[in-house]
Image (cartoon, rainbow, N blue to C red):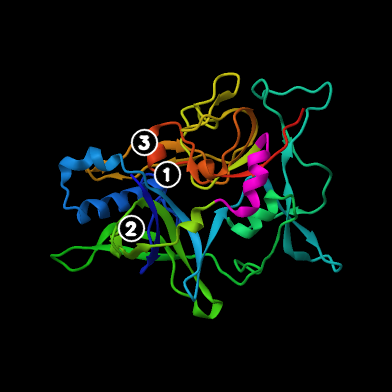
Amino acid sequence: MSMQTYRLTPKAPLVFRTGKPFLAGTRDRAHYPWPSAWAGMLRTHYMDHHGMGPESAEALLQLPAHGALLAACSMDGRLSLWLPKPADAIALAGTEANGADAQEVSFLRLTPISAPAGTGSDLPTGLLPVGLPGKEKGKPRSSPAFWPLADYLDWAEGKPVAVALSGRRLANTLTLPEEETRTHVSVDPQTEAAVEGRLFQTAALDFAPRPKLGAGWVFVGRGPAGLPSGLVTFGGERRLSVLEPADDGIFAVPSALQEPLSKARGMAVTLATPAVFSAGWRPGWLEQNLTGQWPDSPLRVRLRAAVVERWQPVSGWDLRARAPKPMRRAVAAGATYWFEVLDGDIDPARLWLQPISDAAQDRRDGFGLAVLRPWTPLS
């Protein structure tokens, strides 16, 4: 089935849970949606549009749906993609002449390195350590979780990347969606008073338009072609958003990367959405010697290095079973893997923003969408 790009514009703060147990005294912060939430929303919209019923559940699961990615929408409707910060970018803030922390954060580049002679490690055989190319001075700093595509392209070309910080404000005056918290209470219908112990909060992402900044935030993703524009519910509490077709170009390989990638004998791969691997941190389609066939591609590669941050719990609600989905561990978006090409050539159009999770269903659900940049393997 052919796929089409869609834009989703939230009309209310959106609630997405991480999969943590909902127990007394727990609090789940605002969270960006899992790929399965986007897939479920599009499949439900497809089912309603085509008048399908519960008996079509298996057929609906076969529909690929890849999203949701964050995008900035200008006042004239132009979209620009934002990607999770690569895990190999380490934020470091210097100091001003007066000793105060600098308001600009520069990113240092982690890269695969050869292990010094006489050293050892517990890394799998053939996996290179990752480190900084030299000694750097400065304080580690938190930094925005998303980069504009332009910064990612600079990073891919080896150029320096830095952002100006003032709270959550970025250098280009955009502000990432804010967290909105609402307090809820259960009311006894007999006494019309609050029920003791039934007090909880929900945290949501606020996508309210910001006209003074010249842009706002939306989600973009891909799914079955031909879906009509209209209102949909996305996330918890059935809050409304508008779904409409968008330009397919936002999912196309940037022209600056096409030729370098097609000629490269290696690539650094960063996850744009969380991935699910049977082997935990590494793809299950790799053999014990870290070589394997790229999913849905003739390309054969060897994993040379990886930077992976803390795993994330992935769950959700199964509409067909009317029960929670089992919790699984996912590799967080932003994780970066370095691969050496053993056989075949890199086809950027075939691999860019395509899923690399192990299971075919997880790939149809959009887990593990990958963005690429050329890398020269170490000899």
> x, y percentage for residue 86?
62, 48
Tell me the tag on residue 366. Answer: 1
Q: Secondary structure at mark 3?
A: helix
Magenta span: helix, strand or loop, mainly? helix
Of 293 and 27, the residue lying toward us? 293
Earlier in the chain: of badge 3 and badge 1, it is 3
Q: Amino acid at mark 2?
A: Phe
Q: Quadrant of residue 367?
A: top left
Read off the residue under disc 3.
361
The answer to whether the residues at label 1 and label 2 have Cβ atoms under 8 Å apart is no
- Compared with residue 271, is residue 182 higher up or lower down, i.e. above or below? below
Q: Which residue is mark 2?
A: 234
Q: Would residue 303 be seen by someone viewing this image from the given angle?
A: no
Q: Amino acid at mark 3?
A: Gln
Query: Magenta stretch?
Result: 253-266
Q: Are marks 2 and 3 in contact (CB under 8 Å)?
A: no
- Secondary structure at numbered mark 1: loop
